[in-house]
Image (cartoon, grey):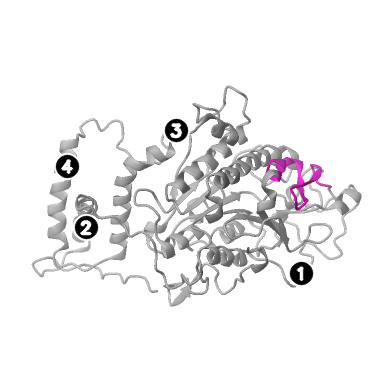
Amino acid sequence: MTSASHPGSAFPHGNGAPLSRRGWLSTAAGGLGGMALSSLLAGEAPPAGGTHPALVFPVKAKRVVQLFMAGAASHIDLWDHKPELVKRHGEESDFGEPVEAFQNGLGPWLKPVWDFKAHGGCGKMLSDAVAPLGDVVDRMAFIHNMVSTSGVHSAATLLQSTGFILPGFPGTGCWVGYALGSLNDNLPTFVVLPDHRGYGSNGVKNWDAGFLPAQHSGTVVQPGAAEPIADLHPHASAQWLTTDSDAATRRALARLNRAHLDGRGGDGRLEARIRTYELAARMQLAAPEALSLADEPEHVLRMYGVEPGKTDWPTEINIPEETHHFGLKCLTARRLLERGVRFVQIWSGNDNGFPRRNWDSHEDVERDHGPLARGMAHGAAALIKDLDQRGMLDDTLVIWTTEFGRMPSSQAGRGRDHNPFVFTNWLCGAGIRGGVTHGESDQWGYKPLDRANPTTVHDVHATVLRLLGLEHTKLTWRHNGVDRRLTDVHGHVLTPILS
């Protein structure tokens, strides 16, 4: 499919005389809001449900939740059990080949910070830091031979979120929204729940629509904030706004828009802006209800680690900070999913601050990973259980990822350096064979055991699209003479983990 063509430097005016660039911008800017509002008054809504030619497979997943650990979570301290590291702890590390470390983190072998125990009927070994997920591990499929093409946070994060190491490409949720459309009329198709302290590497570039129509960008929601969605409602200082004045403004703008549209061609950018305005107007009614926890039973709130009656922290019953914040995002995600949001991205960890409040544990894995891992595991386990008991897990896909792993050797005694050579993802829910492992790392957790056949993010993206009913090679957008796709020119569906 090709993108919409763009107009020249000026559209012709209604009387046949050309407008100057400044005149056109002025007139168009004045009419955008009115076009959206007049569409609302006419009762129009964006199309729901897609018929993209890439939709060729049976649909196993209707919705997706992506849990993204910003900063690079350590696979060998959480998921990938390595007894050899315990046996060799403190010995000089020897990788059998020259190693280019990001910060020269090639100290002695460092055993996992936490003990591992078997969980579930499958007997999966999990670290004590993520033990709550043991209750649902039989629904999860682990991939222990993931590799990245970059050991730099910004590039590797973009690779996981967009399929490319350079900015300017659409996020995964953008592609899904473009291909399949919305499951609802009043909330975004793609919602991003960032870390409460700020964004991870690249910020909005991880969920920007890139060259796709702008309406497919992720919408940022901050659960627990005084204003969860920025600029959704008029500022408190706008006391002069009334229902009558608002209606009169809409009618006036509608008249201006009809005059403006007379004799003018279409513009894909205008359409995207109009749809965004329309959605914002509908969200003013739908979003407050979706984000409110007032109707959640107390036992559900406690399952997620959220204190009844509170959306901020500290809590009065000593719920740990990371458990509260991640649990709140997971509960918000469930509420959005059941109201028809198709893709929700939850972030843990931000890109600034010290001591670290992300997963980039160069100095001390226990200090940095500990609170984040326990909070993540508590919230993710609650989300999976909640989706399951509501009958939603069978058609909701949950994905856990990070930009790369961490080295089995030590850095500064208690930390670990970047490891793009191998790390872990896991998937759960719709169409996934639970209790299985695909791919292995070597005895150290340094590289894939089978170095000739690693798993890439393009393979994971291809698998996600397959579960959504999409053939990843057919989901394309013509940009700068190239048929771009989420999986670039790569990607193989991971059929061994599919049910």
Residue farthest toward the bottom in the current orientation of the protein: 481
| Mark closer to the observer (4, 2) | 4
The magenta segment is: 111-134
Residue 470 horizontal/vertical position (percent): 50, 68
Q: Quadrant of residue 232?
A: top left
Among numbered discs 3 and 2, the one appearing first in the sequence: 2
Residue 415 horizontal/vertical position (percent): 76, 45
The type of residue carrying mark 4 is Ala
Cα separation between marks 1 and 4: 65 Å
The type of residue carrying mark 3 is Asp
The type of residue carrying mark 2 is Ala
- For mark 1, give the secondary structure: loop
In this picture, residue 73 sits left or right of residue 218: right
Among numbered discs 4 and 2, the one appearing first in the sequence: 2
List the residue tagged with mark 1. Answer: 451
Cα separation between marks 3 and 2: 43 Å
Residue farthest toward the left in the current orientation of the protein: 15
Assess whether residue 81 is covered by the magenta stretch: no
- For mark 4, give the secondary structure: helix
List the residue tagged with mark 4. Answer: 247
Find out whether the residues at labels 4 and 2 contact each other: C-beta distance under 8 Å.
no
Quarter occupied by the N terminus: bottom left
List the residue tagged with mark 2. Answer: 28
Among numbered discs 1 and 2, the one appearing first in the sequence: 2
* Residue positioned 18% across, 56% down in the render: 27
Find out whether the residues at labels 1 and 4 contact each other: C-beta distance under 8 Å.
no
Residue 492 horizontal/vertical position (percent): 62, 71
Position of residue 278 relative to residue 177, above or below, is above
| Mark closer to the observer (1, 2) | 1
List the residue tagged with mark 3. Answer: 295
Position of residue 209 relative to residue 245, above or below, is below
Residue 387, labelled with which disc? none
